[in-house]
Amino acid sequence: MAVSLPIAELRTPCLLLDEEKMRRNIEVMRDGLKRLGVPLRPHVKTAKCIEAARAMVEGQPGGITVSTLAEADFFLRHGFTDILYAVGIAPGRLPQVAELASRGACMSIILDSVEAARAVADFTAPTGVEIGVFIEIDSGGHRAGVDCRDPVLIEIARALAPARSARLQGVLVHAGQSYDCADTECIAQVAEEERRQAVAAAEMLRASGFDAPIVSVGSTPTATFARSLEGVSEVRAGVYVFHDLVMAGLGVCTIKDIAMSVLTTVIGSSAGKVVVNAGWTALSRDRGTSSHAVDQFYGLVCDADGTPLGDLVVRETNQEHGVIGRRDGSPFEASRFPVGTRLRILPNHACATATMHDRFQVLRDGVVMDEWKRCGGW
Amino acid sequence: MAVSLPIAELRTPCLLLDEEKMRRNIEVMRDGLKRLGVPLRPHVKTAKCIEAARAMVEGQPGGITVSTLAEADFFLRHGFTDILYAVGIAPGRLPQVAELASRGACMSIILDSVEAARAVADFTAPTGVEIGVFIEIDSGGHRAGVDCRDPVLIEIARALAPARSARLQGVLVHAGQSYDCADTECIAQVAEEERRQAVAAAEMLRASGFDAPIVSVGSTPTATFARSLEGVSEVRAGVYVFHDLVMAGLGVCTIKDIAMSVLTTVIGSSAGKVVVNAGWTALSRDRGTSSHAVDQFYGLVCDADGTPLGDLVVRETNQEHGVIGRRDGSPFEASRFPVGTRLRILPNHACATATMHDRFQVLRDGVVMDEWKRCGGW
């Protein structure tokens, strides 16, 4: 929906997206991976938005990564057909995967156990539905996945073999531990471990006679600081599209690169404290920078044009209230922000903040020029 | 939408509501306030659901409290006309308040500053739109509101006076500090302070010649443990409708009273760790019990029928992953929960968890008998 509206006329709270910054972030990631010679399969779980995803796949093979089957359905309805659902499959959701495949999606799923592989084989064998399968590898994040040296890899591949329509595509790893790095050298090392272990796992499968053509790795930090992607077929990354305070804290971007913010209005202003109408329903409860050198609390406060206001952060959130104060809690001149003042809040975690909203107000040259819908649910 | 579906057929994650428990929670609150002789104006920000709100106002005058104008619009469209919007008004949202009033809503708003009162007076004077106004009092929560002894109360009332259509209704207080109490005796004391200060503020206004007929107080904890509500006109409370682990930790309810849960499926199971498909998009990032004697992490794990499984909690959440473990982190037999197992997670904070969902799957006798929509946005 194309519009042309001054920010001052938007109802608050709402989610702003600076399209120019978004496009620059996309270019930076694209150029970086081009140098390493590996295509990108963008993760659309941050954007959940057709227009943003179209910009992300430009110049790439066109495949996307999703975090829910609701995203898969939404993007399929808008012409995206190569879809990797990168959360371990719940067997009860296989009928929806099949339904998406029957509508023309080239669907891939991931799993990390023999029992899940058997459930997939049992489901696909009678139906003949074509589903790609990746085995998830744990390169140190310890959330999901199997160790790249664990012989269970072969057992999982064997459990899939009877179901010829469930094609083993290869291996997939997400080095979530890159978010715990203190510096970019650490991220580069995590990226190398992610690459090395994924390639090793694929080679183990190939040495046992399994076709495992694809090695899929990625996260925004490792995609940004990887020095080599030898043996890697594709990189997944998502949050780079908007960036956020966590990425800035890791050195992956600067504060100026953050393309997404929450527009809010001052509803109370008294000695040393300013209350705005953006609480956790607008900002999320994410405190991703709480362990960083610079704690941004619930978000960094900017003026209505997006320029940070020193060390002002959202110190507390309730359902519909945010309380603004200085990072160190010391007094500040609240009278600078009378009731009605508009402010922007930069998010700790773009995925979490965006999830609280069903649309973006898209800014070009500081004017709202479009409204882009987001999908939600599962 | 009436249905009849075994829980086993629901797609996960999704939000379950045990209707019988909800109705019992509503009865308990109603009976308690009846003994104190004060009517309830339920806060619908937890439920955001027509069917639940109808049960909450049964036997009450019928007015509701909302936290967003989107809720006001949603409930007005379904026949609720007496609506108190209990978040400090952003002047830019006054046209929406007027629009709701023009559609038949008896709208009240709240504010806590002379500048906001002037903005309301300036808006209503030319339009003649009828809006009720409460002055917010801070009884110790230190989020919003003015001190009950502060003469600014009179200045605020004076600033409203020129706008005859903006009627001063009285004072409103929410003792949010009741959530920080260590025991129920503390809550009872906070309730008494809430009552005493609200009544004192109203009396100050009345002594200065202002009509301030209504004294509105409340929160679920203080509404539960108040010993007297003398001078109080109405009580607001919302989370009691479902209750949650924060309320159980405060002694306001028991774990068995919690009517809301998230249904999830095991997607990975290995030594000492079980991964489910409910991450923070389904549970929220709320860690409301982190300072309690019993830390419930991201939620208490129950079997598919809703019975707690000892000390298993959701220890970590990512966007679509929850990691289950024992509260103290010690090993447990993960093999009890193979891939595909269904579990229910009780929420820390019902408002926050419900916000992540657009509907409830309503259970009667353990069977899904209905689907109730929720409203979102602002």
Image (cartoon, coloured by chain):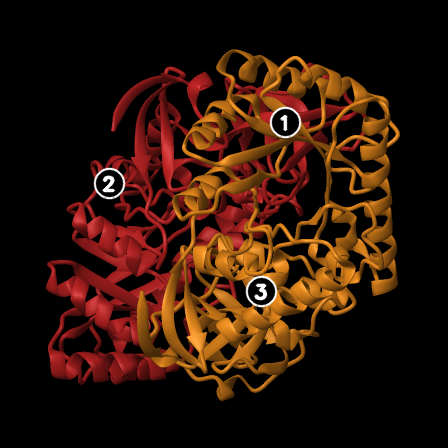
Chain colours: A red, B orange
Residue toward you, B375 or B354 = B375
The image shows residue B6, relative to residue A134, as above or below, that is: below
User: Mark 3 belongs to which amino acid?
Assistant: Phe
User: Mark 1 belongs to which amino acid?
Assistant: Ile
Give me the C-alpha separation between circle 1 and circle 2: 41 Å
From the viewer's perspective, is B53 left or right of B31? Answer: left
From the viewer's perspective, is B277 left or right of B183? Answer: left
Disc 3 marks which residue?
B242
Chain ID at mark 1: A
Whole-percent x, y for residue A249 in the image: 58, 38
Instruction: Write down the quadrant of residue A19 in the picture.
Output: top left
Chain ID at mark 3: B
User: Mark 2 belongs to which amino acid?
Assistant: Val
Dots 1 and 2 on the same chain: yes
Give me the C-alpha separation between circle 2 and circle 3: 44 Å
Whole-percent x, y for residue A113 in the image: 37, 79
**Label 3's element?**
loop
Residue drawn at the location 56% of the way across and 87% of the way down: B333
Whole-percent x, y for residue A154 in the image: 31, 81
Disc 1 marks which residue?
A267
Residue drawn at the location 31% of the way across and 57% of the way down: A216
From the viewer's perspective, is B63 left or right of B32? Answer: left
Disc 2 marks which residue?
A57
